[in-house]
Amino acid sequence: MKRGSVVPVIVMLLLAGCATKKGYNRGEMAAAQASHPLFQSSDLTAEQIEQLKAQVHLPVRLAVAPPIISTGRGWGSREFNTWNPDETKEIESWAHPLKKAGVVSDLVILPALLLEQCQANDQGCAMRVSRSAAARMQTDAVLLISLASSVEKYTNQASLLDVTIIGMWLIPGHHRDALTIAEGVMMDNRNEYVYAYARGEAEEKTVRPFMYASSWKAVRPSRLRALQSFGKEFIREAGQLKKNKQQKP
């Protein structure tokens, strides 16, 4: 084969390798969450659960547990199962509006040193150890937040230059799009009575050269924005607790 005909063949092969954007599969995310249940049900019947009552009076001392990761563990970072500094700052910002609404007297982020290590096959462990740590911190309620992240990887035509040193290090040809969904409940730490539920989600998109392409660099900001979205909804929902209590005869 002549040299002139080799180049077009190589280009065609590289073009064939360029992936296109497919979109997130929310069905797969939901299925993955369902296959990794976070809550281990007690022996109470549905009728008994409906009769549960709050054991404390507002405002409560609220503990915030570490994030419970239901999907998306392979981002190559140890930060995925802890609150990073930006996320901690966001959570701490919820204290003022919650105190103003008369819902909490204090907001405490549970320290990692009080949390036991959970085995991967121990369903309900994260919730159990979080409640135990919350009890040691003498809090009345615990806020449990589940994070599920999905990453879509694809390339653009600039990735053709990955075959060169400059292309690998300087040309942005690799996309990482991350979607994070945050769901959480504020639960009575004594009898599992649920005070409030909230949900938030966010997307983040990055495009980088091959040598700097990283899923975590998209997941991390998507987690923060999902947490911010969750926080707004949680403050609104939790704020109704005091109002509902005042309206009761």
Image (cartoon, rainbow, N blue to C red):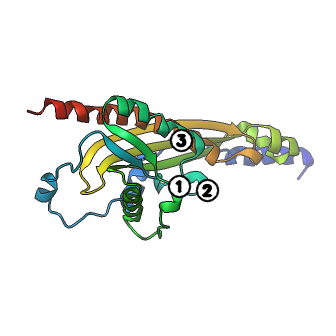
Mark 3: which secondary structure? helix
Indicate the amino acid at tag 3: Glu
Q: Is residue 20 left or right of residue 119?
A: right
Q: How busy is the neighbourhood of tag 3: few (under 14 within 10 Å), some, or many (20 plus)?
A: some
Residue bearing the label numbered 3: 87
Which badge, 3 or 2, is on the more N-terminal residue? 2
Mark 2: which secondary structure? helix
Furthest-left residue in view?
Answer: 249
Measuring from the top left, give residue 242's x and y in whole percent.
24, 33
Measuring from the top left, give residue 25's x and y in whole percent.
45, 47
Q: Which mark is residue 78?
A: 2
Measuring from the top left, give residue 184's x and y in whole percent.
37, 46
Indicate the amino acid at tag 2: Arg
Q: Which mark is residue 81?
A: 1
Quadrant including the C terminus: top left
Q: How busy is the neighbourhood of tag 1: few (under 14 within 10 Å), some, or many (20 plus)?
A: few
Marks 3 and 2 sit apart, C-alpha to C-alpha, by: 15 Å
Furthest-right residue in view?
Answer: 3
